[in-house]
Image: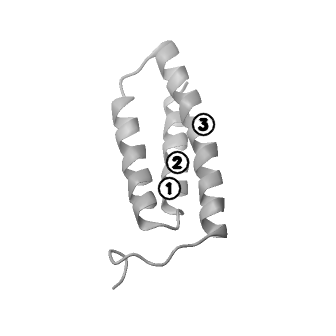
Amino acid sequence: MTNSAAISLFRSLAREAKHLNDYNFRSYAVRRVKVGFQKSRELQGEEAAAAMKYGQEQLKILKRQVILGDLYPSGRSVMESA
């Protein structure tokens, strides 16, 4: 896969992670996206293709989680209140 495809996937995952309703899920998802891409930074060939496929699957799951979170919203966390 190309570097631009990886960057696009990263941005899509990060954008979806920020849409999660619950503070704990949102912060975990954002952190998990960053760590996952840092670990996969040096992959080449088949390993990189497998990581991209896994990332696409995770994006689909994350999109479903955002939809479910919107259907059943939770209250604001103490960490979010100003």
At 52% from the left and 14% from the top, the residue drawn is 46
Seen from the viewer's position, the closer of residues 48 and 78 is: 78
| Residue 56 tag number | 3
Residues under numbered marks 1 and 2 in contact, where contact means CB atoms less than 8 Å apart: yes
Seen from the viewer's position, the closer of residues 79 and 3 is: 79
Q: How many badges with numbers are in the image? A: 3
Q: Position of residue 22 (x, y in %)?
A: 48, 66
Q: Position of residue 34 (x, y in %)?
A: 37, 45
Q: Which residue is mark 1?
A: 17
Q: Position of residue 64 (x, y in %)?
A: 65, 52
**Is 15 situated above or below 46?**
below
**Is 37 situated above or below 28?**
above
Seen from the viewer's position, the closer of residues 81 and 18 is: 81
Residues under numbered marks 1 and 3 in contact, where contact means CB atoms less than 8 Å apart: no
| Residue 13 tag number | 2
**Is 15 situated above or below 33?**
below
At 67% from the left and 68% from the top, the residue drawn is 71
Q: Residues within 10 Å of mark 2 (few under 14, many from 20)?
A: many
In this rendering, position of residue 12 left or right of residue 31:
right
At 34% from the left and 31% from the top, the residue drawn is 39
